Image (tube, rainbow, N blue to C red):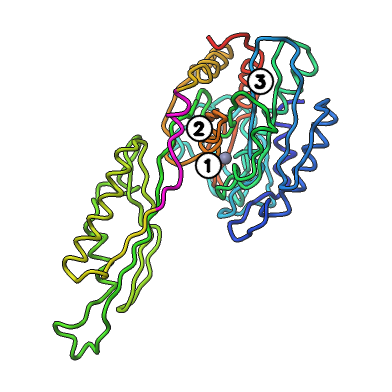
């Protein structure tokens, strides 16, 4: 079976995760896909395929040779829920001609908006009807992993033990919450959850959040002179103390930011919520210190207790872990090159489950799926790029050495 045939089957499952839910998995649709995957893995010959009580799917293929590390491949089953996620009506545009594709909803999937389409010219492109996402993020990863496993099981070749894991709730940041690293048993792993072919992602943000509270003093506005302290205005003054150039909308690449994610307030009290991000740990610490300096400025001006700032660390850049295991990156590079694809690395401007797994003892960079426009109605992926990723994963699992 080819990877895209699997993908077209998986996208029919509605697996949108939901932040509002506290259960795991957060939505029952994910369990339905999880059970179908276990069944498929068993049929394929992955004899220990199983789903645990949290809806995580695991399975492994025994080694056929010695001296090859135990490698894990991981993808997530859920999709985002801030774009309509079902019903997905996918179709294949054969031999994409490089122009605008009119989706069924009437909107064009246009290379003027999405220049990455140029790299799909001449390939068969899987698109949506423009009303939902596709779910290639990350069902393409699942499809590519299982197709590579199927190839290995059908045509015996020397390989180490192979571990496969499919997680729920990645899109709501909980995919690593219940991941059983010892039970999984891999020496290192790769998430298959990126976009452009060749991508190896192992640098993510260091992240913190800040909750800033303001206390004012309400007085009748007619007699407020010299007495009123308006908490909502303190909040605005506070925000103005932060560097405008370091906002998400003004940064890219390795540039970190302060991002105001929420505000509420009136004269008596106000609250601002921020997330802080930087690939460089020292620079993140500097941003945190800056938040406290702004707090001190407000308190100096309006009296102590006018402003309080609580900082919480969220996650860290996995680079510091991955750099201790250079063979993990070299193996991925060699696997791409053996498939005729030039590898490249780009910093992730976010976090990944792989980052958390890396800090918990399972080094886990992220590889491509071949998809594009994730989290949107214009999500698409080329059939041939999925085939290429199957070859890359096959190489990854069967290369004798990392060099
Ligand atoms: Zn994803």
Binning the other alpha carbons within 10 Å of mark 1 as few (below 14), some (14 to 19) or many (20 upward) gives: many
Residue name at image x 72 percent, y 40 percent: 10
Residue name at image x 51 percent, y 15 percent: 330
The disc label shown at residue 109, or none: 1
Q: Disc 3 marks which residue?
A: 70
Which image quadrant shows ligand 1? top right
Picture quarter with the N terminus = top right
Local secondary structure at mark 3? loop
Front of the two marks 1 and 3: 3
Q: Which residues are magenta?
A: 312-323
Q: Nearer the viewer, residue 61 or 41?
A: 61
Q: Distance between the Cα atoms at labels 1 and 2? A: 9 Å
Binning the other alpha carbons within 10 Å of mark 2 as few (below 14), some (14 to 19) or many (20 upward) gives: many
Q: Disc 2 marks which residue?
A: 117
Q: Are marks 1 and 2 in contact (CB under 8 Å)?
A: yes
Q: Position of residue 207 (x, y in %)?
A: 41, 45
Residue 396 to residue 27: above or below: above
Based on the picture, tell me whether residue 155 belongs to the magenta stretch.
no
Res. 97 in view: no
Tell me where residue 240 sits by quadrant.
bottom left
Can you tell me whether the CB of the residue at mark 1 lies under 8 Å from the nearest atom of ligand 1? Answer: no
């Amino acid at each position: 079976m080819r990877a895209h045939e699997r993908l077209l089957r998986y996208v029919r499952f509605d697996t949108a995760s939901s932040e509002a839910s506290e259960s795991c998995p957060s939505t029952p649709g994910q369990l339905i896909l999880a059970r179908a995957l276990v069944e498929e893995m068993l049929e394929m010959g992955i004899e220990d395929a199983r789903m645990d009580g949290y809806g995580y799917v695991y399975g492994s293929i025994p080694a056929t040779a010695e001296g090859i590390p135990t490698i894990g491949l991981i993808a997530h089953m859920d999709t985002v829920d801030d774009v309509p996620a079902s019903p997905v009506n996918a179709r294949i545009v054969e031999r994409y001609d490089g122009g605008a594709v009119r989706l069924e909803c009437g909107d064009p999937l246009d290379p003027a908006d999405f220049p990455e389409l140029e790299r799909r010219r001449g390939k068969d492109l899987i698109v949506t009807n423009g009303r939902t996402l596709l779910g290639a993020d990350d069902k393409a990863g699942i499809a590519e992993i299982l197709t590579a496993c199927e190839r290995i099981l059908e045509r015996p070749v020397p390989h180490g033990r192979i571990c496969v894991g499919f997680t729920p709730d990645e899109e709501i940041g909980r995919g690593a919450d219940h991941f059983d690293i010892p039970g999984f048993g891999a020496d290192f792993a790769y998430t298959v959850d990126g976009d452009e072919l060749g991508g190896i992602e192992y640098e993510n943000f260091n992240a913190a959040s800040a909750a800033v509270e303001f206390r004012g003093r309400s007085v009748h506005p007619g007699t407020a002179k010299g007495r009123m302290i308006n908490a909502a205005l303190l909040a605005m003054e506070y925000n103005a103390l932060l560097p405008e150039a370091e906002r998400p909308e003004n940064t890219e690449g390795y540039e970190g930011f302060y991002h105001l994610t929420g505000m509420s307030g009136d004269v008596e009290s106000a609250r601002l919520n921020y997330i802080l991000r930087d690939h460089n740990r020292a620079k993140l610490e500097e941003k945190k210190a800056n938040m406290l300096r702004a707090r001190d400025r407000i308190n100096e001006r309006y009296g102590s207790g006018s402003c309080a700032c609580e900082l919480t660390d969220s996650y860290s850049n996995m680079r510091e872990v991955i750099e201790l295991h250079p063979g993990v990156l070299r193996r991925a590079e060699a696997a791409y090159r053996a498939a005729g694809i030039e590898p490249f690395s780009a910093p992730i401007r976010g976090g990944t489950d792989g980052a958390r797994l890396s800090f918990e003892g399972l080094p886990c960079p992220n590889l491509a799926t071949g998809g594009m426009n994730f989290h949107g109605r214009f999500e698409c992926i080329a059939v041939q790029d999925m085939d290429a990723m199957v070859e890359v994963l096959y190489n990854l699992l069967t290369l004798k050495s990392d060099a």
